[in-house]
Amino acid sequence: MLSSPIAFPDALPAGYEALADEPRFEAARHLALEAPQRRWTLADFGYDAATIAASASPVAVAGPFRMLSDEGVAAARHVARLLQPAAIESSRTARYVTGGVYRSRFLRDLFGSPELAAFVSGIAGAPLAAHAMPAMQLYVNYAPGDINRHVDPWHADSIGFDAVLMVTDPRRMKGGEFQFFRGTIDEAAAHFGTTPDRLTEGGRTELPADKVETCALPGPGWALFQQGNLVVHRAARLLEAGERITMVPGFVARDTRFPDPTNVASIRGWGEPGLYAELARHKAWIAHERLAGVIDGLPVNASAAEAAAALRAAVADAQAMADLLDETARKTAVN
């Protein structure tokens, strides 16, 4: 059951403004896709067979690899600087811009390009597309004003797949390295005294050094790919003030037979423009393909119980999302 990528909305959510003057994306000019130098699997991280079987890809981390040409780097950096006045802070991430693909047509076309989707699908060994929620398709992260803060502390992501793309030159930075933990989210959660589903909130104590991998990116335009919901990672603090810009494009598995790792319970509280509609569309996208699977695959001699179970399984995620949105609406009404 391979879902086609969901169509981008026709209108911008209230609160986002599109850039008026920016480069036009051209894959031949701006991409320079090269195979990753190394891969780590979920098995390498200690995940069991059941977790691996429930994941669309066996890959945990891959990289570094070249993503952008020199011209692509210059264009991406230019756009990132145009967006920087819109940067906000959170208790976890130092400075970042949301809705990158709403604000910038260049970034939307870059990170939604079929060339990039085919490339990351090859890395993952599974068909991927730009995430069905535009808010999850791209974040732009900037260096904190206070270098005593980590750029982003230890955490797991709220989506299944993403890349970390260095837009500025890492060779000019002191500190600010990308690091990941070669262990499971259960191990990391136990270390932080929390539960795996709350790792999106971040952990600020140090993980065991012998299980921490530091990945040096050779230059701007280089990236790492990861199954972010199962890989605990961070952007370490800078040792000296300087410009550090990364872009984090998000992807989703097109094979809807696998459980959706998107942490919708957490995401629904983020408050970004258009988020509720995005959540509904994302789960409807999954249900649409699963219902098509019922149409095409339900045996003609299925019993009443089997037919009912097939329908319920196809729409279970959508129903659960509706329940969460109802709960959100009730809380909003009370407040």
Image (cartoon, rainbow, N blue to C red):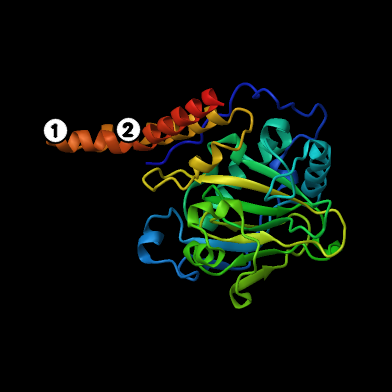
Q: Percent from the top left, x then y, of residue 159?
A: 53, 47
Q: Going by the image, does 298 lie left or right of 135?
A: left
Among all residues in the image, which is located at the extreme front? 334
Residue 242, quarter of the rendered image: bottom right
**From the viewer's perspective, is residue 175 above or below residue 114?**
below
Residue 302, quarter of the rendered image: top left
Q: Nearer the viewer, residue 174 or 82?
A: 174
Q: CA distance from mark 2 to mark 1?
A: 17 Å
Residue 35 shows in the view:
no
Residue picked out by circle 1:
304
Q: Nearer the viewer, residue 148 or 308?
A: 148
Q: Percent from the top left, x then y, of residue 211?
A: 58, 74
Q: Going by the image, does 164 lie left or right of 123?
A: right
Could you tell me which residue is drawn at 74 percent across and 44 percent down? Answer: 89
Which image quarter holds the C terminus?
top right
Q: Secondary structure at mark 2?
A: helix
Residue 237, quarter of the rendered image: bottom right
Q: Residues within 10 Å of mark 2 (few under 14, many from 20)?
A: some
Check residue 291 in the rendering and tell me which mark sits there, or answer none: 2
